[in-house]
Amino acid sequence: MSRVYNFSAGPAMMPEEVLKTCAEEMLDYHGSGQSVMEMSHRSKWFDEIINTAESDFRKLVGVPDNYKVLFLQGGAWTQFSAIPMNLMKNKVADYIITGQWAKKAWQEAKKYGNAKSIASSEDKTFSYIPDVSDLPIDEDADYVYICQNNTIYGTRYPELPNTKGKLLVSDVSSMFLSEPHDVSKYGIMYGGVQKNVGPAGMSIVVIREDLITDDVLEGTPTLLKYKTQADAGSLFNTPPCYTIYVCGLVFKWLLEQGGLEVMKKKNEDKAALLYNYLDQSSMFKGTVEKPYRSLMNVPFITGNDELDKKFIAETTEAGFVNIKGHRSVGGMRASIYNAMPREGVEKLVQFMEDFEKKNG
């Protein structure tokens, strides 16, 4: 069977070159006589893997010297707790609610202190990003939290919020490495890797060094202390070794593509193909207000549930898989991450045009 075009929001499509390298090295990594899946995380081979991965990530993103890069287990959800546990010194934090994941992070943070929603787009089903230029930020706030790209609703911050000098914490899971990131603007920038970086099972946390201290909330688990992980170089306990290895291959692939400026141009081009079609279609409609459209996640509907179901069934049969929207919103969603070739988007648009002619 030939490979499908996988539009899943995550776990998501991976670069074929990376998968081929994984296959070639599966039984014998660089003459070690063993798979990366089998080797000790204390071995010289894995030491090289994790150090090279961090070095390539730093080069790719341009991580400043005063930031640590942590490869951590538990996915982004674990950070919903780790962030307030490590940062809530005043027990106050401000959250901007632009989708389910920001909302879940806010609800989790309320367990540890006074986490407040200072802006929200829930009034219009998270179809836009609220004005973040002059927010009612609490004088005692330890940080301001955002989810910068919303996987379910397909929105993206056109600009970062004015935090009035407060620390910015951002979940960048579904836009990670799709465009340049100015790390210096964040206290913490983090993301689960299963959307745009690698296989599921890990988050990458980029954290400013002065935020890594022993001064954490009482009861913070040892593994959720950033200092525990930073002091041990992400090797305090057995890390997600194979995921780190594959992410390292993706970092090399992205560097070979020309880096994140090049990826942004490619992603803008792919997104324009799909959005331009949606804007002129009489059947399909995008659900996000134009200034806030994500380059990575494109939700759309026909306005007819039965027609949506028919479209989803026919796309799957035609080799365009995981087009169905998130269960909480319905409709369709095409996630067009770095690994999705332009050809995949072109063929999807052609399929949509044909479907519209037949069913219009």
Image: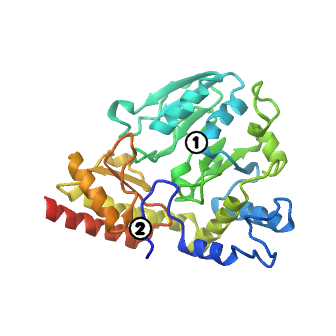
Q: Is mark 1 on a helix, strand or loop?
A: strand
Q: Quadrant of the C terminus?
A: bottom left
Question: How many circles with numbers are drawn on the protein?
Answer: 2
Amino acid beneath label 1:
Ser
Eyeballing the image, is 176 above or below 343? above
Q: Quadrant of the N terminus?
A: bottom left
Could you classify mark 1 by the number of other residues whose Cα lies within 10 Å: few (under 14), some (14-19), or many (20 or more)? many
Question: Residue 213's x, y, as percent?
Answer: 80, 35
Pick the front one: 217 or 311: 311
Residue 5 marker: 2
Residue 110 marker: none
Question: Residue 351's x, y, as percent?
Answer: 27, 67
Q: How is the image coloured?
A: rainbow
Question: Residue 128's x, y, as percent?
Answer: 37, 40
At 64% from the left edge and 72% from the top edge, which residue is drawn?
22
Pick the front one: 18 or 277: 18
At 59% from the left edge and 50% from the top edge, which residue is drawn?
192
Where residue 59 sits, quadrant-wise, is: bottom right
Q: Is 244 positioned to the left or the right of 158 in the image?
A: right
Residue 276 visible in the shown view: no
Residue ID for mark 1: 170
CA gap, disc 1 and disc 2? 30 Å
Eyeballing the image, is 112 above or below 159? above
Which-is-in-front pick, marks 1 and 2? 2
Which is more N-terminal, label 2 or label 1?
2
Amino acid beneath label 2:
Tyr
Could you classify mark 2 by the number of other residues whose Cα lies within 10 Å: few (under 14), some (14-19), or many (20 or more)? many
Q: Is 47 positioned to the left or the right of 20 in the image?
A: right
